[in-house]
Amino acid sequence: SQQGEEDPQALSIQEGENATMNCSYKTSINNLQWYRQNSGRGLVHLILIRSNEREKHSGRLRVTLDTSKKSSSLLITASRAADTASYFCATADRGSTLGRLYFGRGTQLTVWP
Amino acid sequence: KAGVTQTPRYLIKTRGQQVTLSCSPISGHRSVSWYQQTPGQGLQFLFEYFSETQRNKGNFPGRFSGRQFSNSRSEMNVSTLELGDSALYLCASSPDLGYSGNTIYFGEGSWLTVV
């Protein structure tokens, strides 16, 4: 399978705590993206990191990419109840078109007020 | 700017029937991709269209087909529906094929239930 794998599958924390999710993948990639999905809804794009980048920030989000280990992490700082959702990493293979993404199974994050 | 619009949002079909789902990309976007999401298989790529041409196809049977129109709107069709086709079908659009790494944006999806 060319899918990524997120770890952990489920994460439960209190508001104000940080949440860290990890993603591993198998192929050489152009970029890696993180998406959020609220129950039964579409995917919301959070952040894209290119294969030549090592770290990227967006608001309370911090993403790292280690292409030598084929892994990425998503850190959400000072989490809020509204961050409760499933989080997916998605990769675009090197040389492939952008629309063909490979998704992991996701991490279900629950943030308790 | 309006986002990716998918219709219908919910539908129920009977085994053996066919279904057509529609997707309107973000204005100016020319690439449209389709994904199927199920609890068992997760998010799986169906196909990708650009300039009315299918550019990529995932590992799905021939019952799954799609097309793109000159205004970039896309439709996907599933014939001879099976219970296992029950899923959330997601459409995504991007300005181009994005070899350089642009973001793709997803719609809210169409929930298909096959009974």
Image (tube, coloured by chain):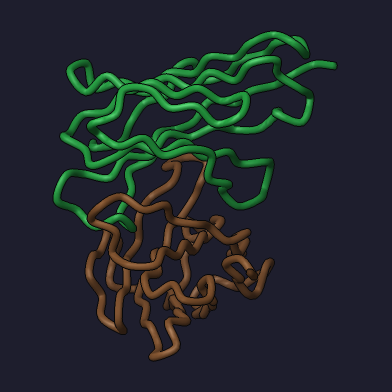
- Which residue lies most toward the right here? A113
Q: Is residue A12 above or below residue B111?
A: above
Name above or below for residue B74 compared with residue B43. below
The colour chain B appears in is: brown
Quadrant of image for the N terminus of chain B: bottom right
Q: Colour of chain A?
A: green
- Residue B60 in view: yes
* Residue name at image x 56 percent, y 25 percent: A61
Instruction: Indicate the position of residue B96 as horizontal and vertical percent values.
Output: 33, 67
Q: Position of residue A50 (x, y in %)?
A: 30, 37
* B91 over B63 or under it: above or below: above
Point out the image quarter for the C terminus of chain B. Answer: bottom right
| Residue B23 in sight from this viewpoint | no
Residue shown at 54% from the left, 77% from the top: B24
Depth order, front residue of B39/A99: A99
Picture coordinates of residue A57, whole percent (x, y): 50, 27
* Left or right, B44 with reference to B110: left
Q: Residue at x 23, y 36 (%)?
A: A1
